[in-house]
Image (cartoon, grey):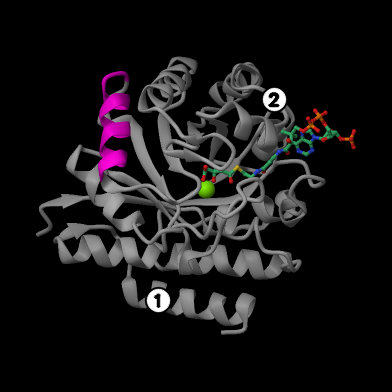
Amino acid sequence: MAADSVTIVEVGPRDGLQNEKAEIATADKLALIDQLAEAGLSRIEATAFVSPRWVPQMADHEAVMRGAVRRQGVIYSALVPNEKGAEAALAAGAQALAVFTAASESFCRKNTNCSIAESIERFRPVMALAQRAGVPVRGYVSCALDCPYEGEIAPEVVAVVSAELAALGCSEIALSDTLGHGTPERTAAMVEATLRRAPARMLAGHFHDTSGRAIANVAAAWELGLRVFDGSVGGLGGCPYAPGAAGNLATERIVTHFAAMGVETGVDLARLNMVAQRIAAQFHGA
Ligand code: HMG
Ligand code: MG
């Protein structure tokens, strides 16, 4: 009997694929999403309803959201930057939404063409739509440790932006190390600052793995009470507006890490490894 459990949010089909240069067929994305569900991932960020001019790889968001086979017990969510995206995502059957802002003004502008305050204003109609539809909204805080344009970010800024998202009605805040250069010490300081404004049950960790310390950052956040972590199968990913950012932490590494601790993830590691091998071969010719 596992002593504790953790929830893994699979962001591969969105954060993982958004940075892929070659066009990926919608059918391949749908197959990936279903294989992930089959492996036991219960929350899957399937696509992003963002501008296709900004992120061409997500241009088929509607077909992906509509086409994803719904398995019982699995929540299929969509990333949305504004009301237009939220409307389309909900119409296509998104069961949860995710909005995104940052703890860095420069990054927020590069990523969404607005200030942090303006991004929060854009989320108000998103929250209203979600509430009417009865779907939860997660809020990402990018650059929670470092910004590619501004350098190190003060923990208190992350805490303040997180509190704003919570006040807006987000049910979960994803503290995101966009660049992936964080250390466990700085992760702990950032999480501790945020915990003074939001309870651990509302916080999730989203770590990119550029410097290879993402799993250590997960461990640091776990110690402080976080129980939701994001992974991208095969470690796919990056952000088109974060130069130098490598892939997300591989989902299979998170599963392996928690299995060794006797913590239940609900994920079948053997199946997940097969998915990781398949996409590596498919997208990177491995
Ligand atoms: P903008 O150009 O300022 O927006 O972009 P606009 O309101 O002036 O609209 C311009 C055009 O975009 C219009 O079309 C709109 O209709 C269209 P036109 O009339 O020119 O043909 N548009 C949309 N189309 C589809 N879906 C929409 C939408 N909204 C407007 N929702 C905007 C502002 C936010 C739209 C743009 O900046 C954008 O789409 N940015 C997305 C960037 C992005 O996706 N980045 C990657 C995801 S974030 C991330 O990876 C970080 C994360 O993983 C956490 C971490 O690791 O840090 C979450
Ligand atoms: Mg990310």
Q: Give yes or no for residue 101 being in the magenta stretch.
A: no
Q: How far across and down, in percent of the image, does residue 167 sit?
A: 44, 15
SS under mark 2: loop
Is 37 in front, or is 215?
Answer: 215
Q: How far across and down, in percent of the image, does residue 110 sit?
A: 69, 36
Dot 2 or dot 1: first in sequence order is: 2
- Name the residue that disc number 1 marks: 273
In this view, 180 is above or below 27: above
Q: Can residue 283 be seen in this view?
A: yes
Which residue is depicted at the point 55% across and 36% down?
97
Could you give the CA–CA distance between mark 2 and mark 1, rounded to whole angstroms? Answer: 39 Å
Is 117 in front, or is 24?
Answer: 117
Q: How far across and down, in percent of the image, does residue 131 sit?
A: 54, 22
Ligand 1 is within 8 Å of the C-beta of the residue at disc 2: yes
- Name the residue that disc number 2 marks: 114
Is 8 in front, or is 214?
Answer: 214
Q: How far across and down, in percent of the image, does residue 182 sit?
A: 38, 47
Magenta residues, as a range? Answer: 185-197
Is 149 in front, or is 96?
Answer: 149
In this view, 54 is above or below 144: below
The three-letter amino acid code for the residue at tag 1 is Asn
The three-letter amino acid code for the residue at tag 2 is Cys
Which residue is depicted at the point 63% across and 43% down?
93
The image quadrant where one finds the C terminus is: bottom right
Residue farthest along the right direction in this orientation: 53
SS under mark 1: helix
User: In which quadrant of the rendered view does residue 124 lie?
Assistant: top right
